[in-house]
Amino acid sequence: MYHNVKHLMVPIKPIEPAQVAWIERTAQLVVAYSTELHGECPSLQELDSFFIQTAAELVWTSTGGKPCWSDLDVEEYIAMHSQSGGEWQGNAALTLVTFLRWMVDCGHLERALATAAIARLDKHVDEWLRSLGFGALCSPNVLAALPN
């Protein structure tokens, strides 16, 4: 049911069947995304799962049970991960923006629903890369070359 991703194997007590469906659908997408990106690497799948599931739980909670990725509060998501330091915050933003782009590319999410969240996450990824000394990777030409 939870596709052998340890983070998702933690018992979650859903409030209603719709929440179970949201969690399971997100789990399926995480496994497909992470496997395509990293292959069969359990530690990377667990990290992807952690970052994406926290976003999915935030979307569920903030929408009153009518989840849509376009309703993601990016600032709150980043704040959730900022307590662990800039590296985790940057990894969280990078993982989620890559996941959202992957969902758009694979037809799991309409581009119009992802555009605002992707733009806000890109800002955080840009700031993180600059803080690590990779400012050249943040030029508009490099970002424009990334798949949407």
Image (cartoon, rainbow, N blue to C red):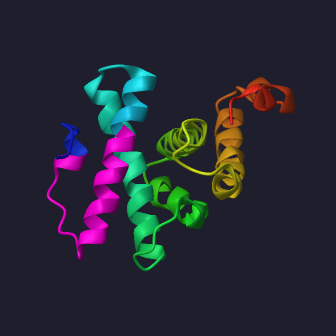
Question: Could you say where residue 20 lies in the image, as x and y percent from the top left?
Answer: 25, 63
Q: Is residue 4 left or right of residue 57?
A: left
As rendered, which of 48 and 1 lies closer to the eye?
A: 1
Q: Please tell me which residue is depicted at 69% across the width and 44% down the height of the picture.
A: 122
Up-down: is 116 above or below 45? below
Q: Which of the two residues, 5 or 131, is positioned nearer the viewer here?
A: 5
Residue 141 position (above or below residue 110): above
Q: Is residue 53 magenta?
A: no
The residues colored magenta run 8-30
Q: Which residue is farthest bottom?
A: 64
Locate the C terminus by quadrant: top right
Left or right: where 79 falls relative to 119: left
Query: Main SS type for the magenta part?
Result: helix
Residue 130 picture location, percent across and down: 72, 34
Q: Is residue 23 magenta?
A: yes
Q: Left or right of 46: which side holds 129? A: right
Is residue 86 shown to the viewer in this render? no
Residue 122 to residue 145: above or below = below
Residue projecting furthest to the front: 107
**Whole-percent x and y of residue 102?**
55, 36
| Residue sitting at x 85%, y 27% | 141
From where the camera sits, is residue 85 visible?
yes
Residue 90, percent across and down?
56, 42
Quadrant of res 56: bottom left
- Give the residue at x 33% y 33%: 45
